[in-house]
Image: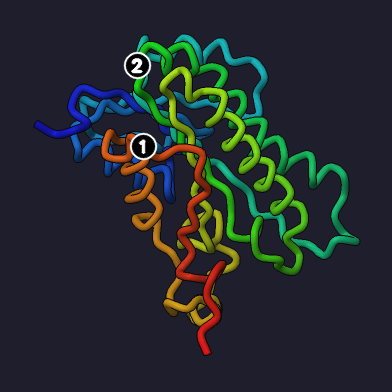
Amino acid sequence: MNLLDNRSFLVVGDSAGVGRATVESLLKRGAMVYGISRSGMGQHDSDLFSHLSFDVTNNDTSDLEAFMPEQLTGLIYCPGSITLKPFVRLTPDDFLSDFNINLLGAVRMIQAALPALKKGKPASIVLFSTVASQVGMNFHASISAAKSAVEGLGVSLAAEFAGLDIRVNVIAPSITQTPLAGQLLSTEEKVKASANRHPLKRIGQPSDMAALAAFLLSPESAWITGQVISVDGGLSSLKPL
């Protein structure tokens, strides 16, 4: 029997990139998956999959609450943004937009899903940060600030939810081949230059993140909580000679 058989997961940002790869990984392992994204592009040909079109910046979560199953074993929040500008060109609205998508969107989803997660415990929540929260990078002030808040949220909730038997962990990737990073990886030259900045000499793939996400959502990681885990080809910790 698969460890995820008959378990239910909410994947927010299921239409592309890491979210879509995570959905596919969970479905292959026999899980029931409830997907959410702004578009209807997250559809999968599986009786184990349901989809809701929903904008995570929307404060009215009534549609979301109606969509939610009675019990959830896990939640993964994948939506993000990449606002790269010199600091002098960043506006307060840039910071607020990144904060709303990355942090407040996660807050809305977790609060809406918490009753179902409590009923489905032991449960797991996975959030996403960025390597730029730990490694200083030019032009990343806005997104780094928002994702650093996500890390703080994740660690704080891990402590608060431990007594509820709900684990919370954060994945901090480097640049990954997703639609979100499309402009940064739009040519072979850009891809090669980005790859060469990483000790492993390649950029990330959605499957790299989805593999860890599926593990953190599963009973196999039952004693892991409150962690910010780097999946970045060694960028955050290695300096090859």
According to the image, label 2 marks what residue? 120
Residue 8 visible (yes or no): yes
Q: Position of residue 77 (x, y in %)?
A: 50, 36
* Residue beneath the point at 44% across and 30% down: 167
Residue 67, compared with residue 26, is above or below; it is above
Q: Earlier in the sequence, mark 1 or mark 2?
A: 2
Answer with left or right where residue 24 lies relative to residue 190: left
What secondary structure is marked by label 1? loop
Relative to the observer, which residue lies in front, 44 or 195?
Answer: 195
Q: Position of residue 154 (x, y in %)?
A: 57, 36
3D distance between C-alphas at marks 1 and 2: 17 Å
Residue 72, compared with residue 196, is above or below; it is above
Q: Position of residue 168 (x, y in %)?
A: 48, 34
Give the residue type that dot 2 points to: Gly
Counting other residues with Cα less than 10 Å from the Cα at mark 1, is it few (<14), some (14-19), or many (20 or more)?
few
Q: Quadrant of residue 80?
A: top right
According to the image, label 1 marks what residue? 223
Give the residue type that dot 1 points to: Trp
